[in-house]
Amino acid sequence: MRNLIDIRDLSTTEIDELIAVANDIIANPGKYSEVCRGKKLATLFFEPSTRTRLSFEAAMYELGGNVLSVAGGNSSSAAKGESVADTAKTVSCYADIIAMRHPKEGAPLVASMNASIPVINAGDGGHNHPTQTLADLLTISREKGRLGNLTVGFCGDLKFGRTVHSLIAALSRYTGIKIVLISPTELRVPDYIKAEVMEKNAIPYEETTDLLSAMPELDILYMTRVQRERFFNEEDYLRLKDSYILTPDKLIGAKEDLSILHPLPRVNEIAVAIDNDPRACYFKQVFNGKIMRMALIMKLLEVTV
Ligand code: NCD
């Protein structure tokens, strides 16, 4: 039985296969509309979510399956003090697969060690978010036609941004990747990602606070929200929240074929005026997230067309 807790639980060959399935789903959606008939996905979300939970649920419905949902930890037995392990054992009696989001780093891993059904990490604290990475990889692959030979800029809250951590881990396995980390010094990528991911894989990277000087070399610009809920005090958040606001004038030095990604939700870090720029890909990412979750659910449930 397979789980998806860290994006590296999937080999690059498996990621390529998921992308191939996703492209086929986009081309032939009718082929997949019954493959999960009789199967149930449980979504257990103990943190706010719009896209991730709804896209998992939409994905399962589009595969012909059903959904059981706990949204908001306060309405579940977690509020009574139940452990993640007991919740996972319980839900294993009702469903065929679990997608879990939790504020504590490692909670989905604990769930996977106790569940008798596959568990998908839908975001654990400031740690990882592997299914957002699947959405990001499909988007990059469709926009650029490749996942290697790219200079990728990450901008914003690189410390707490779990989508950044997972995407760096995924991209570090491809050749010709260069990473530019653009953030305030307080919100730099954690040292363990530099040491255990980029340096270990000999990925060239640079750190800067200056988005404009980095812009001309970027093929991908991955913008992120400052993660207010992970800050220890409000003053730090208020001081750092407007560090980077992408407006049309800042794109003057950018490549014509730059792709601008953002996992969403956006607060103000990308001006709405950018939305109609052909380089804006963030709403395509939303669509691609549902498709990749369809491909992933099929893989983990071992269903075929
Ligand atoms: C992200 C998350 O939850 O980490 N959102 C998402 O799932 N698309 C990014 C964020 O909240 O800023």
Image: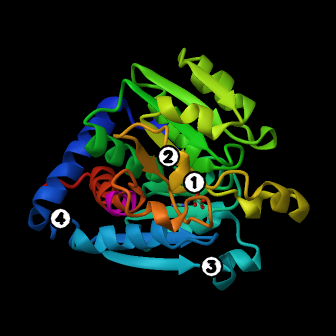
Bin the neighbour count of mark 1 within 10 Å (Cα to Cα): few under 14, some 14-19, many 20 and up: some
Disc 1 target residue? 246
Residue 159 image-quadrant placement: top right
Give 213 or 66, whichever is nearer the viewer. Answer: 213
Query: Residue 35 bears which disc, if any?
Result: 4
Whichever of labels 2 and 1 marks the residue nearer the N terminus, that label is 1
Q: 207 or 124: nearer the eye?
A: 207
Of callouts 2 and 3, which one flags the residue occurring earlier in the amino acid sequence? 3
Residue contact between numbered discs 2 and 1, judged by CB atoms under 8 Å: yes
Percent position (x, y) of residue 195?
Answer: 67, 22
Hey, what amino acid is under mark 2?
Leu
Q: Quadrant of the C terminus?
A: bottom left
Q: Callout 4: helix, strand or loop?
A: loop
Q: Position of residue 95 (x, y in %)?
A: 40, 70
Q: Tell which circle, 4 or 1, labels the residue nearer the N-terminal end.
A: 4
Q: CA distance from mark 2 to mark 1?
A: 8 Å
Task: Please name the amino acid that badge 4 sits on.
Answer: Val
Mark 2 burial class by Cα count in 10 Å: few <14, some 14-19, many 20+: some
- For mark 3, what is the residue? 72
- Give the residue drawn at x 72%, y 35%: 190
Q: Which residue is mark 2?
A: 251
* Majority secondary structure in the magenta region: helix
Vertical relation: 210 (above or below) 118 = above
Range covered by the magenta-colored residues: 285-290
**Is 16 left, or right, of 281 in this rendering?**
left
> As drawn, is 176 to the left or to the right of 302?
right
Question: Separation of disc 2 and disc 3 at Cα?
Answer: 39 Å
Mark found first going from the N terminus, 4 or 3:
4
Instruction: Tell me which label, 2 or 4, sits earlier in the chain.
Output: 4
Q: Callout 4 environment at 10 Å: few (<14), some (14 to 19), or many (20+)?
A: some
Ligand 1 image position (quadrant): bottom right
